[in-house]
Amino acid sequence: MWINTKDSFNTKLKPLRSILKIVSTPNSNPSFLPYLAEHVVEAVSEMEKLSNASSFRYRLTPYIDGSDHYILSDPTVGIPCIAFIHWPDKYYHTDLDTVDNVDPKELRRVGIATSTVALMLASPSISDLTLIIGECLRRLTSEISSKNQKTIGRVMRKIGRAALNEAARDLALGFIKVNEYINLAVEILKSICRVYGYSEDVDEAIRIVKDYGEYEAKRLEKLSIRHDVPARIEYDNNESKAREIIPTRSFKAPLDFNMLRKLIGENAYSKYIEMFEHSRNLKNIFNEVINFMNGKRSLLEIYWKVLAEYEEADLKQILEFIEDLKEVSLIKIIKL
């Protein structure tokens, strides 16, 4: 496991209202590490409050690319990696990115947090194991609940507008997402054993999170019965096409989009420039589409996983991306 801190200390924060972002590992390479880091940062924040220090702004964020962590977190490399990054940062990678623009208080905070996490990983103990299992379980069940509540809210709004076909589709997607959340939670809990060895407490935590996931699925089932809206997806053309292909990557490590630009040419790549301008997450979504390729999953199954991770994803764009990768032999496609 790895912690990337190279972009963590850059700026004097107050004028910029910067936030310390704890960048999660991708769902394609799940780990307990983001939850441990968030817990430690919370503890540092509480310690700062007791000493009457200035406020400390931080947030755990979904996986994004852009620094060393995303190379290591690629499943073909296989090292779960988080990153501590302050953003926004007007000095970032400029000639003003100098020591006099470093915030010493923030340097101390991040230094304490990262060294604590590193020590807990390097010197595992039973007390640490108990704490990590508890923190992961608390955060995982909370995330499953909050994400499922968003689905319920969407379904209820569409029922209110009498858009019953859309409500039925969202309900079916809700069941798919809950299943993805459960599978992800199980893998995150299993990742604890990579550091701390086998534990019956991890097995018990997995049982609890599965039971909690079933409870959330029953909430969707009750909603379906109460409003007489069956969970149903009628596949459109893009979904039918994605269902019939299994993509397999032909390269290791993350895709270099500059290389893709050279391979497909400026004219073909211009659409991606426009896409990336309209969607800040799209490059991360494309990276995860590649990361989830294992020679067994259909593109539709990969799409469900990405949808569960980022909430929004455009399958038409993903299909175009897959076709371009195939044309330059970066992936192979098996048709079912």
Image: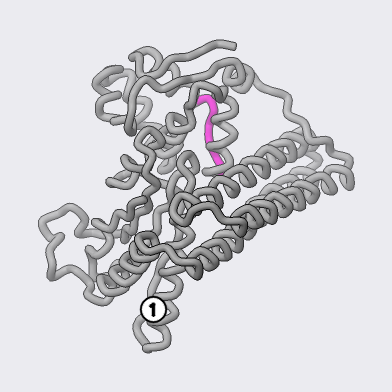
Q: Position of residue 240 (x, y in %)?
A: 63, 18
Residue at (37% x, 44% y) in the render: 79
Residue at (30% x, 67% y) in the render: 16
Question: Is 189 colored magenta in this rendering?
Answer: no
Q: Is residue 47 visible?
A: yes
Residue 47 falls in which quadrant of the image? bottom left
Q: Nearer the viewer, residue 209 or 200?
A: 200
Q: If the image is split into quadrants, where does the C terminus sit?
A: top right
Residue under pointer 1? 55
Residue 50 falls in which quadrant of the image? bottom left
Residue at (61% x, 20% y) in the render: 243
Kindly state the secondary structure of the residue where label 1 is placed: loop
Q: Position of residue 42 (x, y in %)?
A: 45, 72
Residue at (50% x, 67% y) in the render: 126
Q: Please tell me how crowded label 1 is: few (under 14), some (14-19), or many (20+) other residues with Cα within 10 Å.
A: few
Q: Position of residue 95 (x, y in %)?
A: 10, 56
Q: Majority secondary structure of the magenta segment?
A: loop
From which residue to which does the magenta span run?
311-316
Under mark 1, the amino acid is Ser
Question: Is 315 colored magenta in this rendering?
Answer: yes
